[in-house]
Image (cartoon, helix red, strand yellow):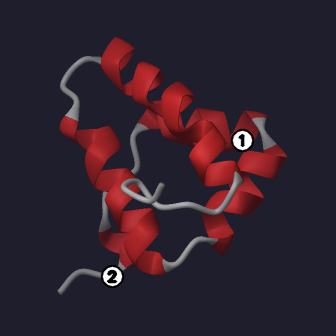
Amino acid sequence: MKTTSEFEMPVEFKEALEDNADLNNAFQSLTPGRQRGYLLYFTDAKLSKTRQSRIKRFSTKILTGKGLHDK
């Protein structure tokens, strides 16, 4: 099983984390499983525009400490 650091991080998400320190801190405080869930979901999109849209849509969930499928 891969560790979280072995998963590919999309360039768009790296930029979002660099631009927003709160988002970076919130993402780093998530459990490894939640981090992997987001990374898999973001990298699954083939177009950069789609990845950016997904990152923007789920930033609030990351900031509140919730996983991809948490309510």
Q: Which mark is residue 42?
A: none
Which of the pair 53/24 is nearer the observer?
A: 53
Q: CA distance from mark 2 to mark 1?
A: 22 Å
Q: Position of residue 24 (x, y in %)?
A: 71, 53
Give the crowd class for mark 2: few <14, some 14-19, many >=20 residues within 10 Å.
Answer: few
- Earlier in the chain: of badge 2 and badge 1, it is 2
Name, please, the residue furthest toward the top: 49
**Amino acid type at mark 2:** Thr
* Rendered residue at 17%/87% (across/down): 1
Residue located beneath label 1 in the image: 18
Q: Position of residue 14 (x, y in %)?
A: 55, 42
Q: Is residue 68 left or right of residue 47?
A: right
* Rendered residue at 60%/39% (across/down): 59
In this view, 21 is above or below 54: below
Q: Classify residue 45 by image quadrant.
A: top left
In this view, 9 is above or below 54: below
* Rendered residue at 36%/53% (across/down): 39
